[in-house]
Amino acid sequence: MREKDTVALLKFLRASEPLKSTLRSGFTASGRRESTAEHTWRLCLMAMLLEDEYPELDMLKLLKTCIIHDLGEVINGDIPAIEQSAEHNKNEQERRDLDELTSVLPVRLKTKIMAMWDDYDQGGSKEAQLAKALDKQETMLQHLEGKNSKNFDYRFNLTYGKKQTNFYETTRAFRRLIDEDTEQVINRNGT
């Protein structure tokens, strides 16, 4: 690798570091706001644990997709799922932000990352579809496990990501169990 490319990689890694402190709307079990990097870590863990369930998929591609799926949030932060609307296209914003973030990289790396993100956004490959399903399910799990405010709308979980989580039997099974847990929380809390 040329020194110029090494310098560019370090610049990109430094620019990506704030993802560790980019906060999401969800809370951890201890009551602290969850970071985007923490969400991404557990998403990758979920994907890794399912490797044997999907032998036909390229696991490295799946993990890379999980790693970069929210990387653009380092610039303008996360837009909570519950607050997303047609007026503000989260995907367009994240793509612009990722394009800006990767602008310091050598062209071949920037092109790879942007193509991977586009595949994720469009659900073009089976790996992208699974990453998107697991992304929704990790968020739903965090809603159930976090120390949320008393007026948190757990019913949101019951409709969130229905289309994306109807991927394969395993994601449908996860969905059923998470929905059951959500129903229990709603019945217990009355919300």
Image (cartoon, rainbow, N blue to C red):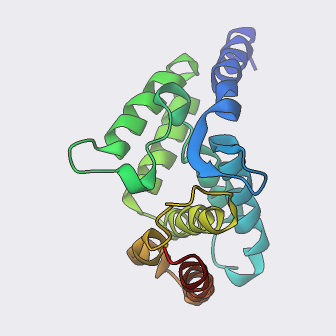
Quadrant where the N terminus is found in the figure: top right
Residue 7 horizontal/vertical position (percent):
71, 11
Location of residue 124 by image quarter: bottom left
Residue 47 horizontal/vertical position (percent):
70, 66
Residue 19 visible? The answer is yes
Q: Residue furthest left?
A: 87
Camera-nearest residue between 86 and 62:
86
Camera-nearest residue between 154 and 165:
154
At horizontal 46% and vertical 28% (from top left) the residue drawn is 76
Residue 55 horizontal/vertical position (percent):
70, 79
With 78 as the anchor, is 68 left or right in this view?
right
At horizontal 62% and vertical 64% (from top left) the residue drawn is 138
- Vertically, is 147 above or below 77? below
At horizontal 60% and vertical 63% (from top left) the residue drawn is 143
- Vertically, is 4 above or below 113? above
Residue 170 visible? The answer is no
At horizontal 50% and vertical 33% (from top left) the residue drawn is 77
Residue 109 horizontal/vertical position (percent):
58, 31
- Vertically, is 129 above or below 65? below
Q: How many marks?
A: 0
Location of residue 161 by image quarter: bottom left
